[in-house]
Amino acid sequence: MSFSKILLCLGVLLSFSAYSQGDESGQRLQLRVYLEGALINNANAVSEDGRPLMRDNLRVSPFTGLNYLPASNPYQTIVSEVNLSNANAHVGIGNRSDLVSISNPDQVFGVFGDNAIVDWVFVEIRKAGDTDNVIATRSCLVQRDGDVVDLDGQSHVWFPDLTDETFHVAIRHRNHLGVMSNVVTSENLIDFTSPQFPVFDFGTTRGQGLNYQNLSQKVHINQGYRTLWAGDFNADCKVKFAMPNDDLTIAFYEQDFSGTGYTPGYFQGDFDMNSVVTFSGANNDSSLLEAQAKNYHLNPTQLPNFDYFIEQIPARN
């Protein structure tokens, strides 16, 4: 092994050790989730154990080779005029400085392969039997293989103020619809990619003659796996193509702001998470959003302004 590789390995070990020291009260959770946008056109890439791999084009843009992932939690900021904190407010000590910023971003974002970072996600812990009650939150990272990890880029996610033995887990992403589990514990893998993993849905409780059963997530083209629904550009917990209060307006704003459809960055209207917002060409973000909204199971007449494509997580107290 070369001297440079030895130094790199030593740096990783020291970083992990430093990150793991201190108060280890609370619980660590093993989480897994797929983001639909990052699985589009993934060239059928699979992990070492055969699971689909998401693209990491925000970490290494195919247009510039640069990283556009922020080193600090984006969920309490404004991205492209979208206030992400409205739906992602921290509870407890989740907003503590050491829990929202990556101390060594070059190292964390320098990892390639199955464990390369795709983006940030926001995790909520909700009270068992009281799904409106959020008791703990964390901002975390998701890897290409779907593993959700802490800010060292490798550890299971630490919730220092989580003491409940059973609870619900909700995972959100800034331009996807989130999902919430049924009651779980910290002892097992909480795997939102598995069709067998039980998740919450509204069923027929929302009225309008709509039945949301089995629609909390999307069954992706990679059969046998579930993903979060992409397309919630304005972070209002809904996917909608046409006005009013639509998601397409955000993508228009971002393209106008950039001056061209091929200026890479960290954008809300980037449906397929390839680092650009486009309105022309194959699989452009506008057409992907339109297809998502019109082909939703509860929109049989394919209304472009269908208003009931919603995130199935109960509102907070």
Image: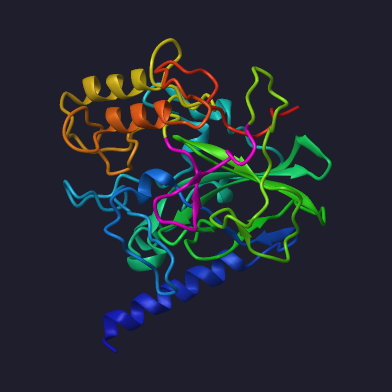
Among all residues in the image, which is located at the extreme top? 244
Relative image position of residue 8 (x, y in whole percent) = 35, 75
Among all residues in the image, which is located at the extreme front? 300
Left or right placement of residue 83 versus residue 170 in this view: left
Left or right placement of residue 33 versus residue 109 in this view: right
Is 308 located above or below residue 164 in the figure?
Answer: above
Magenta-colored stretch includes residue 16? no
Is 36 located above or below residue 234 in the figure?
Answer: below
Query: Is 18 or 297 nearer to us in this picture?
Result: 297
Relative image position of residue 90 (x, y in whole percent) = 64, 37
Magenta-colored stretch includes residue 218? yes
Quarter of the figure with the N terminus = bottom left
Relative image position of residue 315 (x, y in whole percent) = 69, 27
Among all residues in the image, which is located at the extreme bottom? 1
Left or right placement of residue 74 versus residue 282 in this view: right
Task: Tell me what residue is drawn at x 24 percent, y 38 percent.
Answer: 283
Task: Tell me what residue is drawn at x 51 percent, y 18 percent.
Answer: 307
Relative image position of residue 300 (x, y in whole percent) = 47, 25
Q: Which residues are magenta?
A: 212-230
Task: Tell me what residue is drawn at x 28 percent, y 24 percent.
Answer: 254
Evaluate whether residue 240 shows in this view. Answer: yes
Residue 316 falls in which quadrant of the image?
Answer: top right
- Magenta-highlighted stretch: main secondary structure? loop
Quarter of the figure with the C terminus = top right
Task: Tell me what residue is drawn at x 64 percent, y 17 percent.
Answer: 208
Evaluate whether residue 94 shows in this view. Answer: no
Left or right placement of residue 300 versus residue 285 in this view: right
